[in-house]
Image (spheres, rainbow, N blue to C red):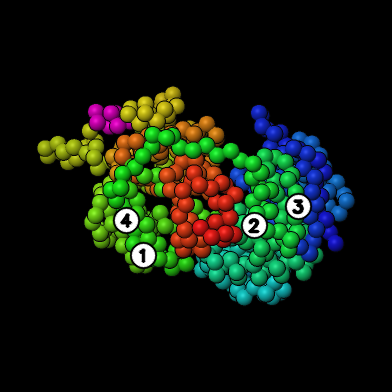
Amino acid sequence: MKTLETRDISKMYPGCLALDSVSVSFESGKVNALIGKNGCGKSTLVKIISGAHQATGGDLLIDGEVMNFSSPTDAFASGIATVYQELSLIPYLSVAENIFLGRLPLKRNLIDWKKLYSDAQILLDEMNVDISPRAEIRSLAMWQCQMVEIVKAMSTNPKVILLDEPTSALATNETRELFKIVKKLKEKDVIILYITHRLQELWQIADTCTVLRDGHLIGKIEMENATHKDIIDMMFGDVAIRHRPDDLEYKDEPVLEVNNLNRKDCFNDISFVLRKGEILGIAGMLGSGRSELLRSIFGADKFDSGEVIMNGNSVDGISPVKMKKLGLAMTPEDRKNTGLVQIRSVKDNLCVASIDILGKKEDGKGVFIDRKKETRFVDKQVDELHIKIPDLKLPVSSLSGGNQQKVVVGNWLNTEPTVMLFDEPSRGIDVNAKQQIFQIIWDQSRKGVSCIMVSSELEELLEVCHRILIIRNGKLDGEVIPENLGIDELYSLCMGGVEA
């Protein structure tokens, strides 16, 4: 049996102790899960193991030998392979070429194609992966690409393989296929470290579960003895949840209705009503269909059947353009790639969604931007959202994560929406910025704007929302009032531990 061990591993960043004397061991022949809420330190620990970061103190050992890595290259040379959430495959190359990239077999200084495909086929067969070594990566499904990534990592005969959120972009049936290859890894005498946010996966794939909280090791538990409550208690301990201000009330008037919405492999038969001024949370584990539901309501993705009603009228031919005209706005989960134009200025980004409102006609000269109105729009959002920026002409990429998120929100507020969809509005921003974003949502509620909020941090939903819908495995599984339950109960509901 091989072992990967950390002894008193600590990591100090300026003003932050990310890891505090973490000592834990992981054995081969098992799937060792590593979990914890955002900010717990698990990403830092993984980066230290993979050589991307260096520990401030403590030791990392493989089979009792102390390892000192100054780079991922050092870690790789010592037998540590990492399969990241973001795929590193080259789309226009074959499976075989990707597996042996940088190590292609040569014959008389030319690529030995016969040996390349033969060696790749042997590896694929060993892992029971039914994919042709000649297939181009671009022709494969996401779950097949993840399998190729794992085979590529195993081709180096690693001692340790780190699987970083391997199922985050996969549907349920695709996840099952990926689990088959992960279980096959257990036979290879390799140490498997499995990082996931999908807590419901633990009982399907993991043998042990190690939990970090606030940079501390809380414990390691055998999954055959673990309950949902055990895992949740280890993750959260005693968490004090603040609740929304008492003056936030909503009216009974429906502004958005969703009836029997269906989208294959994402969600099924979803129905709910959003009322004027209400803040409605949608809770569920990663992969439950939360974000996909918001995107379908907004028209960014198509749904298969069902109905969306805005202000009492059924909407046909749903698209982002049509929904925007009807008063719907959406701040996307990935603000960097889909919420902002990074190379453009803060000023431009605050006016992207309202560009049609800013246009004015000039006789014989077409349509031009009304610069006075544009200035009013920009100044209003900078002032009301407290966006900190020395110069509006600077690219939005120069701002902090919190200020970038405010620009995303301000951009859509300039369209004067009646309904706002917030998908992971606090992702990647600090505590103070989170509270500012929550205050913005509360302010919109006071103005009568209705909001739907999705967040992986379920405690945020308890803090911000009037009401929370539970989505589990793509189905609406209940409705709760934040004042009536704690964070442990909400997580249990999302995982299916108790009934809503």
Q: Quadrant of residue 246?
A: top left
Marks 2 and 3 sit apart, C-alpha to C-alpha, by 14 Å
For the point 36% across and 65% down, the residue is 260
Q: Which mark is residue 71?
A: none
The quadrant of the rendering that contains the N terminus is: bottom right
Q: Position of residue 30 (x, y in %)?
A: 76, 62
Type of amino acid under label 3: Lys
Type of amino acid under label 1: Asn
Residue 411 belongs to the span the image colors magenta:
no
Marks 3 and 1 sit apart, C-alpha to C-alpha, by 42 Å
Q: Which residue is mark 4?
A: 257
Q: Which residue is mark 3?
A: 220
Q: Which residue is mark 1?
A: 260
Q: Which residue is mark 2?
A: 228
| Other residues around mark 1 within 10 Å, as few (<14) / some (14–19) / many (≥20) | few
- Residue lying at the far front in this picture: please name it: 484
| Mark in the foreground, 2 or 1 | 2
Type of amino acid under label 2: His
Marks 1 and 4 sit apart, C-alpha to C-alpha, by 10 Å
| Other residues around mark 4 within 10 Å, as few (<14) / some (14–19) / many (≥20) | some
Q: Is residue 357 left or right of residue 9?
A: left
Give the mark, 2 or 3, whose residue is nearer the N terminus. Answer: 3
Instruction: Provide the residue span drawn in magenta.
Output: 372-378
Quick check: 334 above or below 343? below
Secondary element type, mark 2 = helix
Type of amino acid under label 4: Glu
